[in-house]
Image (spheres, grey):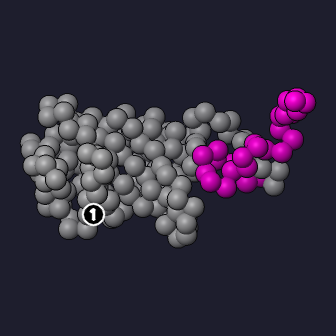
Amino acid sequence: MSTTFETIIAVAKAVTPNVTPVEHHGDLTIHVDRDHFMDVLAELRDNPRTKFNMLVDITAVDKNTSPDRYDVVYFLLSLEFSHRVRIKVGVRDDRMELPTVVEIWESANWYERETYDMYGITFEGHPDMRRFYMPEDFMDADGTQLYPLRKDFPLMGIPGSLPLPPKEEI
């Protein structure tokens, strides 16, 4: 690991020792538990040795395993140092929420809404938690909300919602 990565990891570990750094192909990802992730994010933003002042994106990964089915991933950028880091926080399928980080980065507003809309993960304290792309009534026939980027979403879409094009004979 380079000195840059060591500094980032040291700053995160100063907040909580419960961080797991992973370096892969020159990129750093830090896994943080849900109880400390907001403190780690705020420290990475405010610490003069890291200055991650830009939230580039938030998304989720559906690993399709229980109980830790999802990882919410925060992509951070330090404009001053030109460093990047990903912070991953595990989300259980029986507890599908995390606190909002809008107080840390205002741009999280849009990214959290998009993550909610595509995966169904809610962000507690968000100022406007509603769907972003899909209509509010995007539901299954039984009234269950649907989230298109989940692994259990039907690959061919919702049966009967749109006609498929006719098969061409070869």
Query: Could you tell me which residue is drawn at 90 percent across and 30 percent down?
Result: 169
Q: Judge whether residue 113 is colored magenta.
A: no
Residue 141 picture location, percent across and down: 83, 50
Residue 106 picture location, percent across and down: 34, 35
Q: Name the residue that disc number 1 marks.
A: 20
Query: Could you tell me which residue is drawn at 60 percent across and 46 percent down?
Result: 149
Q: In this orientation, does residue 10 appear? A: yes
Left or right of residue 15: residue 3: left
Q: What crowding class fits label 1: few (fewer than 14 Cα within 10 Å), some (14-19), or many (20 or more)?
A: some
Query: 157 or 46: nearer the eye?
Result: 157
Q: Write the start and end of the magenta stretch as one range.
A: 143-170
Residue 60 picture location, percent across and down: 48, 49
Q: Judge whether residue 153 is colored magenta.
A: yes
Left or right of residue 55: residue 139: right
Please tell me whether residue 76 is drawn above or below residue 150 in the rendered image: above
The picture quadrant where one finds residue 99 is bottom left
Left or right of residue 154: residue 23: left
The picture quadrant where one finds residue 39 is bottom left
Query: 64 or 15: nearer the eye?
Result: 64
Q: Amino acid at mark 1?
A: Thr
> Which structural element holds mark 1?
strand
How would you classify the magenta stretch by its main secondary structure? loop
Query: Could you tell me which residue is drawn at 45 percent across and 38 percent down?
Result: 111
Residue furthest bottom as drawn: 67
Please tell me whether residue 18 is drawn above or below residue 102 in the rendered image: below
Residue 68 picture location, percent across and down: 49, 66
Query: 29 or 132: nearer the eye?
Result: 29
Query: Could you tell me which residue is drawn at 69 percent across and 50 percent down?
Result: 153
